[in-house]
Amino acid sequence: MHFFPKLRSIVFNYTRNTLQRLCSPGNEAYGKSEHAVVQAAARHRMREGERRRVPWFEYAVTGAARGMAQERNLSYARKREESVKKGFERIMRQVPILLEEACGGRASEDRNALPKCSWEDRMKSYILTFP
């Protein structure tokens, strides 16, 4: 099948571009995934905090400094959330690169390109089932 390398390249590029769109901020799938990761990180932080004693907080919640302690805690939570979001974005940007690596190299129309993502043999077998 002489056109297979071209077809494989088209399919790979379409798949990579679709993943790139889904793994970029600004779409519903990304937003839902990011939200789930932020929530999971917050739950983990809460469990970790239950096991730890926080002396400054214990001191601050006594007396007039209670408001300052709550504000400080909220500021920390916001910074932590932003850090998790940035980390998530950094990881998601790698998805198209990881796809290319998983497929065995650079995408091109070369006959031997993307050897781990080739379905040429299965396609040929399928096509040969038709008269």
Image: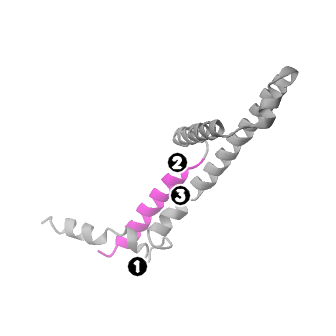
* Main SS category, magenta section: helix
* Disc 3 residue type (three-letter): Val
- Nearest-to-viewer mark from 1 and 3: 3
- Give the class, few, some or many, for how many residues have Cα within 10 Å of label 2's Cα (few <14, many ≥20): some
Q: Residue at x 70, y 46 (%)?
A: 83
Q: CA distance from mark 1 to mark 3?
A: 22 Å
Nearer to the camera, 102 or 7: 102
- Element at label 3: helix
Instruction: Locate the C terminus by quadrant.
Output: bottom left
Question: Which residue is the site of mark 2?
Answer: 22
50 left or right of 104 in image = right
Tell me which numbered mark, 3 or 2, is placed earlier along the sequence. 2
Image mark for residue 112: 1
Tell me which numbered mark, 2 or 1, is placed earlier along the sequence. 2
* Disc 2 residue type (three-letter): Leu
- The span picked out in magenta is 1-24
Tell me which numbered mark, 1 or 3, is placed earlier along the sequence. 3
Nearer to the camera, 82 or 92: 82
Residue 66 at x, y percent in the picture? 82, 23
Q: CA distance from mark 3 to mark 2?
A: 10 Å
Nearer to the camera, 12 or 83: 83
Q: Residue at x 24, y 70 (%)?
A: 124
Residue 93 placement: quadrant: bottom right
Question: Which residue is the site of mark 3?
Answer: 95
- Give the class, few, some or many, for how many residues have Cα within 10 Å of label 1's Cα (few <14, many ≥20): few
